[in-house]
Image (cartoon, rainbow, N blue to C red):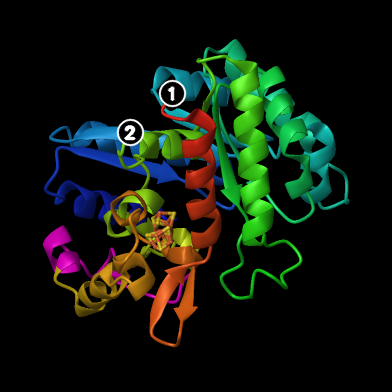
Amino acid sequence: MSINTLEKLFILLCSLPQAQVRTNWHGGEPLLAGKDFFSHVLRLQNQFQQKVWLNAIQTNAILVDDEWADFFHNNHFSVGVSVDGSERTHNINRINVAGRGTYKKVMCGVETLRRHNVFPGVICTVTKKTVKCAKEMFMSLVNSGFKDISFNVFYNTASNCEEDIYGLTNQEWLLFLIEIFEAWLALDDPTVRVRELDGALAWTETKSANYCSFKGLCHRWFAVNYTGDIYPCERLGKTILFGNVESLETFQNLEDNPVLLSWKESIGRLPEKCIACDLQSLCYNGCVAHRKLEGGKFSLYTYCESRRAFFDYITQRLGGKEV
Ligand code: SF4
Ligand code: SF4
């Protein structure tokens, strides 16, 4: 992203109605943008002091050195790294251009962060090739010191999950969640937090999990790419364009955009199955990027069945006990 586009973006962010603005710096690999880029981000944030700026960054940690780690620590960045479980499971999918697994380099970056008192959370992507290794992945993340763990189900929006070589079926995802839940219970360590379990445990108190794909909050996120084009969440790809930071002067102009209004309306419409579902207020038809057309009319959450079954499993397993 050019400095000019970045500055336009901050003018737009300043016009948001809320006092607190959270930016998640994603790539590809966002550290490739370089230290000068992020120093300029901070200069802009200092310039616009009417907002409280929160920065989060999701990195593969390979480029993390002492200087980056210091930068994140001194500027209160919340750091997430991408580690797919154990060295064995990580290296199945995450290889470098020479075809070699990247686990050792990633964990070297993680250690550098920790030496500088930056304790990253982890996002672990689960694919068809790793879905049967739930306990191995979870325990390896715990044993390598992660306390804040999220699992991303791999779903290719462009293909049918039953046929995709990486995508998971409902049954695979359900069994994975159950195995993680049992491993987490057996671990009995309240300092270890798993996003997917927090979500499910909130249900048992009839609360909605604090995460967009449980709350119908997709419209609260925008993705801005390096050209300044604005889209919904990056999981949805680049098929729905709301505008560009160059042409939009205020957030209100973005909010009034007919493409955004019609998209918001379409994602809020629930299929009949959800309207009749007792989990509706705890689920909201799941992640918008993981929906597919049901009867040619409304899009239903692809992992509806596993979400429903996991809810039933947890409810029975706990039998009203608090965790
Ligand atoms: S596409 Fe999914 S992950 Fe992205 S904001 Fe929407 S609900 Fe959340
Ligand atoms: S569990 Fe299934 S039917 Fe119920 S609200 Fe979620 S997606 Fe809809």
The residues bearing labels 1 and 2 have C-alpha atoms spaced at a distance of: 10 Å
Query: Which of the 4 image quadrants contains residue 188?
Result: top right
As rendered, which of 86 and 16 lies closer to the eye?
86
Q: Amino acid at mark 2?
A: Glu
Q: Quadrant of residue 20?
A: top left
Magenta part of the protein: which range?
Answer: 237-255
Local crowd size for mark 1, using a 10 Å CA cut-off: few (<14), some (14–19), many (≥20): few
Q: Nearer the viewer, residue 268 or 245?
A: 268
Q: Is residue 243 magenta?
A: yes
| Observer-nearest of 95 and 188 | 188
* Residue at position x 11%, y 48% in the image: 17
Residue that appears at 68% across and 27% down: 141
Could you tell me which secondary element the residue under label 2 belongs to? loop
Most common SS among magenta residues: loop
Ligand 1 lies in which image quarter? bottom left
Percent of width and height locating residue 202: 37, 35
Instruction: Please tell me whether residue 241 is drawn above or below residue 83 in the rendered image.
Output: below
Q: Residue at x 32, y 42 (%)?
A: 208
Query: What residue would you read off at disc 2?
Result: 205
- Left or right: residue 61 versus residue 5 is right
Question: Dot 2: few (<14), some (14–19), or many (≥20) neighbours within 10 Å?
Answer: few
From the image, tell me which residue sits under label 1: 321
Instruction: Locate the C terminus by quadrant.
Output: top left
Q: Quadrant of residue 51?
A: top left
Is there a contact, CB below 8 Å, between mark 1 and mark 2?
Answer: no
